[in-house]
Amino acid sequence: MAGRIRKSDIDEVRTRTNIADIVGDHVALKPAGVGSLKGLCPFHDERSPSFHVRPAVGRYHCFGCGEDGDVYTFLQKLDHATFAEAVERLAGRIGYTLHYEDGGPAASESGNRARLLAANRAAGEFFVERLASPDADAGRRFLGERGFDRAAAAHFGVGFAPKSWDELTKHLRGRGFTNEELSAAGLVSSGDRGPYDRFRGRVVWPIRDLTGETVGFGARRLFDDDKGPKYLNTPETPIYHKSQVLYGLDLAKRDMSRARQVVVVEGYTDVMACHLAGITTAVATCGTSFGVEHIKIIRRVLGDDSGLGEVVFTFDPDAAGQKAAVRAFAEEQRFAAQTYVATGPEGLDPCDLRLARGDEAVRGMIDSKKPMFEFMIKQQLAAHDLDTVEGRVGALRAAAPIVAGIRDPSLRPGYSRELARWLGMELGEVSRAVSSAASRPAPVERDEAPPRLSGGEPAAEPAPRPQGPTLAQLPTDASTRLERDALMGMIQHPALVGDALLERATKTGFGNRALAAVRDAVGANIATASSPEWLDTLADAVPEVLVGLARELSIAPLPQTRGEELLRVYVRDLASRLVDRDLQRRKRDLLAQLQRTGSGEDPERYRAVQQSLVELEAERRSLSQL
């Protein structure tokens, strides 16, 4: 049994890892204030970014769904990895050797997810090596006939699965993998003769996740005696979920984020053809239709929150392609980016088009894209006989809801005019049909059914965590804003505030009770302000109901300020204003006491109050020296 990873190693790997690099493999991040980055949350669907990352403290927080944690938590939640697997993966990324207590095995020998990834990695290397073997002539010929040379195959990691019962199985068992691990990775199947290779006599493409790890494979049939499907993919495994992967995304993600564009094509060879033709933002689904989970991934990588990006779909002209277009259109509203459809001349897909007419033709196909709405309207018109009154009325009824569903209201009148022109009908009649379609209630979206256990009973939901106020729910009066902003500066940059001012500010009165509780936690733990555990210490020190608020205060972006010195002035000014506000309140109280006492009624008390006023004024003058 594997021993525990030493805590010192866990802390060291966390310290050496930039959380922005890890999150950035999955989310397009952009600056959001001093030391803060933001992007679309990978844990829930959202239109505008509320997911913030602070690399300096190694934490993230979503102000939309409340997800919060460090780099290990991120990998655990996003990839369903165990804590040990998250540590091992990051250690491997930075080349750090982990040490285990109780004589546990090396990192490469522990962690189920790590083993499955290693098995896939070894299988991919095997397939690539076998593509150069004499018995892979059919595979090389398949690629060559589609315009892909050896360099192209190497760039995409394309390989060949030999036409053998268990050659891969024997190879991987020789590398130390067990039958159980190979089966769990989807590389072998079991039959009457024992384990056998799932992929045999096929061209094989590695399917990689956003980090570049191979999580599965897609394989194309080559031989007539292969009775399997034309394309065979890895089955669902602990690391491969076909609805959550896109082929080519590991190669396309940088240019997708930079160009704010993604081109969704039909298959592996289409992705290859597009990339080789210069369309390096092309991706494809893997053995399943384009769905909601794919949209979530694309939106995160694009940073799809401004409406400035573009999503281009390519569809085959056959019936399957038309169905794919309808499915994609049904989900179009989930994008903030503009959606388009690109079709090749004579119905050629990108691979065939490149082979027939070259790279420029592929680029021209994407450049000549049409808005998704126009494409879908014309699809509806093509299904009706526009030479008859009945056909035109039927086409109008079919197309009006599409125009009514256009997100940008400024585009609807223009499409109404176009629809009237295409139908040869009066604009007023078309506009009335569009208005009528827009007034119909949209279907109610229902939440997914609760997960069920193997016995069919709904799984018990975890007990809800106590919910306290969030930053967005705090009052917006000037006093509360000062307390909030000052706490953000004190928590995020305690060293810039300075111990003396920090201690004094945490002794001031707060009007908001929730913020006052966080203030008390800060004051009680000033000694740990410079330690890596500072934020966790604060979270442990506040009541459980306020943990979320404390986390938000530690992550929420401060206003843009250039340079550390200006930042220091900013956070110290906020803390000083807290102290000054407290001193002013005390001064008002003392003056009121002085007025009530009178110099003749109680001279001794009168002098004591005067002395307190003098001392308070001296404290106020010395505030700048803290």
Image (spheres, rainbow, N blue to C red):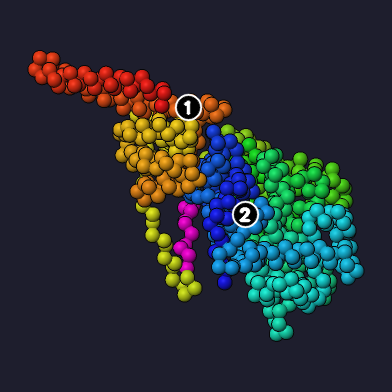
Q: Amino acid at mark 1?
A: Tyr
Residue at image coords 75%, 66%: 123
Quickly name the residue at label 1: 570
The percent position of residue 10, horizontal first and vertical second, equals 56, 55
In the rendered image, the quadrant that contains the C terminus is top left
Residue at image coords 56%, 61%: 5
Q: Is residue 292 visible?
A: no
Badge 2: how crowded within 10 Å, few (<14), some, or many (20+)? many
Q: Amino acid at mark 2?
A: Leu
Badge 1: how crowded within 10 Å, few (<14), some, or many (20+)? some
- Tell me where the magenta segment starts and ends, as one range: 443-452
Is there CB contact under 8 Å for labels 2 and 1? no
Please identify the quarter of the rendering in which residue 209 is found.
bottom right
Under circle 1, the secondary element is: helix
**Disc 2 from disc 1: Cα separation:** 35 Å
183 over 438 or under it: above or below: below
Q: Is residue 259 visible?
A: yes
Under circle 2, the secondary element is: helix
- Residue furthest to the top in view is 600
Residue at image coords 43%, 25%: 573
Quickly name the residue at label 2: 90
The percent position of residue 177, horizontal first and vertical second, equals 69, 72
Which residue is nearer to you in this view: 93 or 119?
Answer: 93
* Magenta stretch, overall SS: loop
Q: How many marks?
A: 2
The percent position of residue 259, horizontal first and vertical second, equals 70, 39
Q: Earlier in the sequence, mark 2 or mark 1?
A: 2
Please identify the quarter of the rendering in which residue 605 is found.
top left
